[in-house]
Image: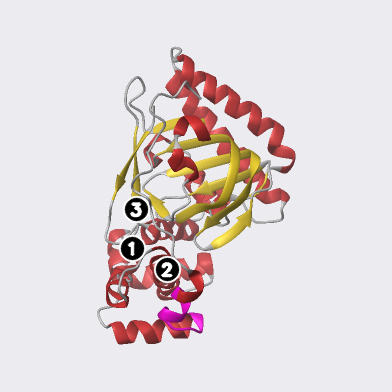
Amino acid sequence: MDRFRDTRLPDLPLHRLEVPLPHLLPFAIGTFDTIGPLSRAAFPHRHTFYEIVYVTGGSGAHVLDLVRRPVEPPQLCVIAPGQVHHWDGAEELTGHVILFNEDFLLPHADDVSALRALAGRPGHPAGDQAGPIAALLADMGGEYRDLRPGYQNVLRACLHILITRASRTLVRTGEPADASAAARDRAAELASAFGRLLCRPGGAQRPVGWYARELGVSAGHFQTLVRRATGRSPGSLIRQQQTLEAKRLLSGTDMTIRRIAHQSGFSDPAYFCRFFRRETGMSPGEFRSRAGLKHHDPRIESIAAHPDGP
C-alpha cells in the first residue's frame, strides 16, 4: 500500500510519497484506515506531495497553516506541498484520501492553480458537488484496486475531473476559481509559478532577483507581472511567506529563535524579531507561548501494514 517516508528535518517532519508494488505510481487512493495513521496525524507536518481529503464522517478539526476549521462532513480539504497541517481532536474520521505528486497530473495548465486556490483554506463544504464527488471517488477506488488495463490513464482523467468539481465548490461559496482564464494570462501564469516556488521548503529564503532568474524574466518585468496578477509586489509576498514559515516553526517545533530566524531567511536574529513584531504585533516568544507545541510521536506507524484495499 501507499508508504510515507517520515524524514526528520531540522524543523518539521516531511512526508514523502512512496507507492510500492503493484502500482509504483506517484498516486494513491484509500480510506483513512487503509492509508494509515498518518492520514489523520495529530502533529504538524509537511508533504512533498498533494493530498485531497474528502471527509464523510467524524468530528474534530483540521488545522492548515495555523487556521483551524471544524470537521463538518461532507467536507473537502486540499493540502499543497510545503503547507503544514494536522488534525486536532479528530475522532472516527471516514472518507477518502488521495495522494499524488504534481507529475501525475494531466497537462492541464489550470489544475495546479486550482489546487493552490483550494489549499487556501483548511476545509469547505462540498455542497451540490457532494454526490458527483462521492461517485467519482468510488470509481477511482475501484480502478486503483482492480488494476484493469489502462487504469492509470483513467485515474489521471478522473483526478482532473475531481479537481474541476472541487473548484466548483469555490464558485458556489463566492470565491474566485476561474483558474483556466487566469492561466491564459501571462501575468497570472508567472505569479502562479512564483507562488509554487515560494511555498516550497526554503522558498522564503530567496531574494526577488533569484525568482526572476529562475522564471526566465528580468527583475523589472517580474515585478510588473506579479503586481499585475496579485496587486502586491514580489517582496511583500516573500515577507508574507517568511512570516508564515516563522509561525509554522514557532508553533510546531522547539527550535531556538536563532535557528528559526535562519530557516525563515534572516541572518540576524535581532532583525528577525523586529520583523516578526512588525508583521504580527507580537514577539516570536509571545507567539510561541500562545500557539503551544505539538510534536510527532515516532512510535506512530506510518501506514497500515496490511490494508485490504481502498
**Left or right: 66 with respect to 69?**
left
Which comes sooner in the sequence, label 1 or label 3?
A: 3
Q: Are marks 2 and 1 in contact (CB under 8 Å)?
A: yes
Residue under pointer 3: 13
Residue under pointer 2: 241
Say what amino acid the circle numbered 3 marks: Pro
Residue 223 lies in the magenta-colored region: no
Neighbourhood count class around disc 1 (C-alpha, 10 Å): few under 14, some 14–19, many 20 upward: many
Say what amino acid the circle numbered 1 marks: Gly
Which comes sooner in the sequence, label 2 or label 1?
A: 1
Res 305 → quadrant: top left
Secondary structure mostly seen in magenta is helix
Which residue shows up at 55% across the image and 41% down it? 53
Where disc 3 sits, the SS reads: loop
Front tag of 1 and 3:
3
Q: Are marks 3 and 2 in contact (CB under 8 Å)?
A: no
Which comes sooner in the sequence, label 3 or label 2?
A: 3
Image x and y of residue 142, in percent: 53, 19
Between 218 and 93, the one lying in front of the other is: 93
**Which residue reaches farthest right?**
128
Q: CA distance from mark 3 to mark 2?
A: 19 Å
**Left or right: 18 with respect to 193?**
left
Between 285 and 243, the one lying in front of the other is: 285
Where disc 2 sits, the SS reads: helix
Image x and y of residue 26, in percent: 37, 33
Magenta span covers which residues?
280-288
Q: CA distance from mark 1 to mark 3?
A: 17 Å
Residue under pointer 1: 203
Res 249 → quadrant: bottom left
